[in-house]
Image (cartoon, rainbow, N blue to C red):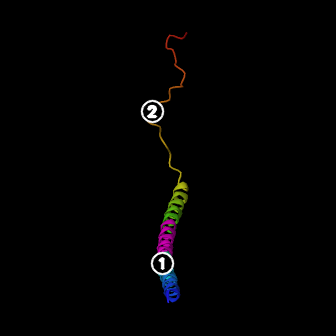
């Protein structure tokens, strides 16, 4: 009789350990799938952000190309300091 009780307790112990392992595995699989979906969502957000930046750069480039076609004269605000000084006394 004691032999059957020990085998039954051992079988019950193994069944509880196996059930806990399976439940833990299922929770972990669910957690990993949620994290993967979160990573995918963040990757899409980053790609959209990069696309917006590229669109802005393209618009900036086209504006610069349109602006570079015009020759606007630039008048310096400071007088040139390298001009030779003319001496009135004729030295």
From the image, which quarter does the C terminus lie in? top right
Tell me whether the residue at label 1 lies in contact with that at label 2, contact meaning CB atoms closer than 8 angstroms. no
Q: Decide which of tag 1 and tag 2 comes sooner along the chain.
A: 1
- Direction front: furthest residue: 1
User: Where does the magenta region start and end?
Assistant: 34-50
- Direction left: furthest residue: 77
Q: Which residue is mark 1?
A: 24
In magenta stretch: residue 66:
no
Rendered location of residue 7, percent (x, y) = 53, 86
Of 26 and 2, which appears nearest the observer? Answer: 2
Identified at 50% across, 90% down, the residue is 1
In magenta stretch: residue 49:
yes
Dot 2 falls on a residue whose secondary structure is loop
Q: Which residue is mark 2?
A: 78
Q: CA distance from mark 1 to mark 2?
A: 78 Å
Quick check: 65 above or below 23? above
């Amino acid at each position: 009789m004691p032999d059957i009780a020990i085998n039954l307790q051992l079988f019950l112990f193994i069944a509880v350990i196996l059930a806990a392992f399976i439940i833990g595995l299922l929770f972990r699989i669910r957690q990993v799938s949620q994290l993967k979906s979160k990573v995918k969502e963040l990757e899409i957000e980053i790609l959209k952000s990069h696309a917006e930046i590229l669109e802005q750069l393209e618009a900036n480039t086209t504006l610069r190309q349109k602006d570079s076609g015009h020759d606007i004269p630039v008048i310096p605000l400071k007088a040139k300091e390298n001009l030779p000084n003319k001496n009135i006394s004729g030295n």
